[in-house]
Image (cartoon, helix red, strand yellow):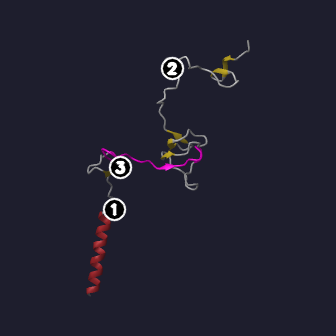
Amino acid sequence: MKIYISIGRNLCIAAFLLLNCGDAVAQVGIGTSQPDDSSILDISSTDKGLLIPRVFLTGALSNSLDGVNPSPVGLTVFNTNPNVSDGNGIGYYYWNATRWDKVTTDASNNSWSKNGNTLLSTDFLGSLTINPLISRSTILPQAPLIRTDP
């Protein structure tokens, strides 16, 4: 009789524990005891950073990092390959469902502004090849600039 009571009591305790801890959902805080309610992960530090996984991307069009599993949309990595095919060198990339896009900023300010640029004597608009520079409007060429010898 004693064996049956012990087993029944243990089953009741196990059932109670399983029913009370099923859907516990909460935010995770690292370096903080009160993670923000709108976050899944809240990381706080005054002297440390977040180290994103470093990978060697072989191509910006390859959707798998390990050759087997497809990358989920939004996956972010730090590429260490300066010669990634169809990519743009070393830096942060994210998977957009069709390719790895580099997260960039134009810190060098080498772009042409729609509001005009202040040019130096070494700046130019043109081509470093023998091919002409062609301005396009929709798909039709407009005002091609062709070099002629004097």
Q: Position of residue 9 (x, y in %)?
A: 27, 77
Tag 3 secondary structure:
strand
Tell me the residue that label 2 is attached to: 114
Q: Earlier in the sequence, mark 2 or mark 1?
A: 1
Q: Amino acid at mark 3?
A: Leu
**Which mark is nearer the camera, 2 or 1?**
2
Q: Amino acid at mark 2?
A: Lys
Residue at x-position 25% and y-position 86%: 2
The label on residue 150 is none
**Which mark is nearer the camera, 1 or 3?**
3
Q: Which is the main secondary structure of the residues drawn in magenta?
A: loop
Q: Amino acid at mark 1?
A: Gly
Q: Pointer 3: residues within 10 angstroms few (<14), some, or many (20+)? A: some
State the residue lying farthest toward the top. 150
Q: Which residues are magenta?
A: 38-62
Q: Pointer 1: residues within 10 angstroms few (<14), some, or many (20+)? A: few
Tag 1 secondary structure:
loop
Does the residue at mark 2 contact the one at mark 1 (Cβ under 8 Å)? Answer: no
- The CA span between labels 1 and 3 is 21 Å
Query: Quarter of the image containing the C terminus?
Result: top right
